[in-house]
Image: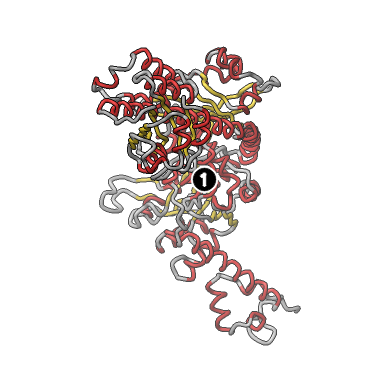
């Protein structure tokens, strides 16, 4: 890199023939060769002084280098007498410090034709005379950005005035000396930077590699060499294919080779997970991240790779997969319905309720937020029931227009209304002998609520356009995300229908309450949709899994399912990941938590009132009544009892006859 930077400066040499062409061509080439071959700086500078000295008999040259403090001059090369050098080495630059000190200070050439008469040489006149010097010319050596590097001096033993050729010659000498100094310092700086970088890389807690464009190993840090027990030369001599065959786990070899080949050809960052053998013969998982270094033309000049030990993560992932497999088998065995996925205590509680209620014919009301899987629970109840071999008919009450829902549920006779060209069986008749699932039952219009109440009480229906009752043997399962107690209080849902539906309530937990189930659900849906799309994912991006677990999931399992299906369709490669913009970290919608909170408060309030009634044996008023115990007015408590659908009479103690 230093060569590339220094080369353009060679074009700045004088092209006029006068001074350069009078110099021996072999001497010029020797000086350039020394620079290019990396000879020590003092040798290069001495060759330059000798080169210039051949131009004029009796002339001596010297090169001063500016000290790091920017104030003093130190000899870099000279053929001057030892006594003179001792007197002038390390002088502080200034306007009256000889030719060289003045040239460095003034940043311009200084020509002193007679040392004895020039005030700049007052301090050094005796030393100069003792050395036999009478004329001294000096030119500053400047860097490409105008900084003073030192001075080039030419000394004569007689009084002498510079001519045009000599002025050009000292300028030429100063410039070539400047190139040599800059080049050498750049090389030293580069070597120092490389040493520091190497030391830093060796301390990194990762394996670090530098590759050429073909993937040949150029460098490796000490941690990598210590791990595999090879020297850098041994790794380089093995070659990429042989090294991979020796160090990569056989099960990962073909895949890793293919991914590496494609990645290097792509010219963009890429990652590979593979098992690498250590010097102890044991394999560990590593995540290799490759990043290209581009040159000025935008082409790959080098590849930098880091390898992070992920053995613990892989072991954890495998353990979780094994545990999930066992749990899924257990859940399938316990619930007899494979789509119910999870192992959290919240879900297990629901499944225990399902197991207890399934074999009865009791009506079940399934409560929970939208997307929690209420229909799956209804299907699980049906599958484990004595009706499991018969029909399971689901109806979304919120999706059917109010004008058609009676016909949809109970059927209609031919001519019952415009468009009824033939008799049609309703969902209850279709489910006869089996189970009907009324989803979003809280959205039923009032007139249908009355008809449904009759079905639950009488076990018979009437088709629209007919007054003939039709007996049906159907088990009713209902579900809603709404607070039915609140709807009853608002007069939007019949209290007696609620009693009929709420024989066995089951409350589905939200996905927020089932956070431990998220990894298992993710794996399940990836496998399900991956098979459908003809894709197979080997790993799940850790960032994606953390994103899933941190997200609030207002749409619960249904939202998770939709996100995973979209990601499976759009993902490339064998690592599953999602775009984090799909899951905006926004507060949950107010509606769902408010409904859930209201329901919880109402249930708590109902429990407190029932406890007070039990304590007072159903008495409301009076000093020992429930109203006094609760600190409420009697009329207020009466209103609450009615609104919450509490049967106050069941708390009364029968009087002895």
Image color mode: secondary structure
Decide if residue 167 is on the left or right side of residue 325. left
Quadrant position of residue 653: bottom right
Residue at 63% x, 39% y is 331
Place of residue 77 in the rendered image (x, y in percent of width and height, measured from the top left): 47, 27
Decide if residue 645 is on the left or right side of residue 370. right
| Quadrant position of the N terminus in the picture | top left
Query: Closer to the camera, 390 or 129?
Result: 129
| Quadrant position of the C terminus in the picture | bottom right
Q: Relative to 303, does residue 403 appear above or below in the rendering? A: below
**Circle 1 sits on which residue?**
548
Q: Residue furthest right?
A: 656
Number of disc labels: 1
Residue 61 visible in this rendered orientation of the protein: yes
Q: Residues within 10 Å of mark 1 (few under 14, many from 20)?
A: many
Quadrant position of residue 316: top right
At mark 1, the secondary structure is helix
């Amino acid at each position: 890199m230093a060569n590339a930077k220094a080369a353009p400066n060679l074009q700045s040499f004088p092209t006029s023939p006068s001074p350069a062409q009078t110099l021996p061509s072999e001497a010029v080439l020797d000086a350039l060769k020394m620079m290019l071959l990396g000879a020590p700086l003092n040798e290069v500078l001495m060759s330059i002084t000798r080169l210039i000295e051949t131009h004029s008999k009796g002339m001596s040259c010297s090169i001063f280098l500016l000290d790091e403090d920017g104030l003093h001059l130190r000899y870099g090369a000279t053929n001057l007498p030892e006594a003179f050098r001792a007197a002038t080495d390390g002088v502080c630059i200034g306007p009256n410090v000889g030719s060289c000190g003045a040239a460095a200070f003034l940043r311009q050439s200084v020509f002193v034709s007679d040392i004895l008469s020039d005030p700049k040489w007052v301090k050094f006149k005796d030393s100069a005379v003792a050395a036999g010097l009478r004329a001294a010319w000096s030119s500053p050596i400047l860097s490409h950005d105008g900084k003073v590097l030192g001075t080039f001096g030419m000394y004569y033993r007689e009084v002498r005035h510079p001519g045009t050729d000599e002025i050009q010659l000292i300028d030429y000498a100063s410039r070539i000396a400047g190139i040599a100094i800059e080049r050498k310092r750049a090389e030293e700086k580069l070597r120092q930077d490389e040493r520091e970088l190497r030391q830093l890389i060796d301390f990194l807690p990762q394996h670090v590699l530098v590759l050429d464009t073909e993937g040949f190993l150029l460098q490796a840090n000490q941690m990598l060499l210590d791990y595999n027990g090879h020297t850098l030369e041994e790794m380089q001599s093995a070659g990429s294919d042989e090294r991979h065959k020796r160090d990569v786990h056989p099960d990962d070899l073909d895949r890793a080779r293919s991914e590496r080949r494609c990645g290097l050809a792509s010219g963009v960052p890429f990652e590979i997970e593979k098992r690498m053998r250590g010097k102890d013969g044991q394999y560990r998982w590593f995540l290799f991240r490759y990043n290209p270094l581009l040159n000025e033309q935008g082409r790959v000049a080098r590849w930098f790779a880091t390898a992070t030990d992920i053995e613990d993560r892989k072991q954890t992932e495998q353990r979780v997969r094994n545990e999930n497999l066992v749990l899924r088998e257990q859940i399938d065995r316990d619930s007899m319905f494979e789509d119910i996925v999870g192992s959290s205590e919240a879900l297990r509680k629901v499944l225990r309720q399902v197991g207890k209620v399934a074999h009865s014919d009791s009506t079940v009301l399934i409560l929970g937020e939208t997307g929690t899987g209420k229909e799956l629970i209804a299907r699980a109840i049906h599958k484990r029931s004595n009706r499991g071999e018969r029909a399971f008919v689901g109806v979304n009450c919120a999706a059917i227009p109010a004008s058609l829902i009676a016909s949809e549920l109970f059927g209609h006779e031919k001519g019952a209304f415009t468009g009824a060209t033939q008799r049609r069986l309703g969902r209850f008749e279709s489910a006869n002998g089996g189970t009907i699932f009324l989803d979003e039952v809280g959205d039923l219009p009032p007139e249908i609520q009355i008809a449904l109440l009759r079905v639950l009480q009488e076990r018979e229906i009437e088709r629209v356009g007919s007054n003939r009752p039709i007996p049906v043997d159907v088990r009713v399962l209902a579900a809603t995300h709404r607070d039915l107690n609140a709807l009853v209080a608002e007069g939007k849902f019949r209290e007696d229908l609620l009693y009929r539906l709420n024989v066995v309530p089951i409350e589905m937990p939200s996905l927020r309450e089932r956070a431990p189930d998220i990894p298992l659900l993710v794996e399940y849906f990836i496998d399900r949709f991956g098979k459908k799309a003809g894709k197979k994912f080997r790993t799940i991006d850790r960032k994606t899994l953390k994103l899933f677990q941190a997200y609030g999931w207002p749409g619960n399992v249904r939202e998770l399912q939709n996100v995973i299906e979209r990601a499976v369709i759009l993902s490339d490669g064998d690592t599953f990941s999602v775009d984090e913009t799909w899951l905006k970290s926004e507060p949950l919608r107010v509606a769902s938590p408010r409904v859930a909170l209201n329901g919880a408060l109402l249930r708590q309030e109902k429990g407190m009132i029932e406890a007070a009634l039990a304590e007072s044996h159903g008495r409301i008023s009076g000093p020992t009544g429930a109203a006094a115990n609760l600190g409420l007015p009697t009329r207020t408590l009466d209103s609450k009892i009615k609104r919450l659908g509490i049967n106050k009479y069941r708390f009364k103690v029968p009087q002895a006859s």
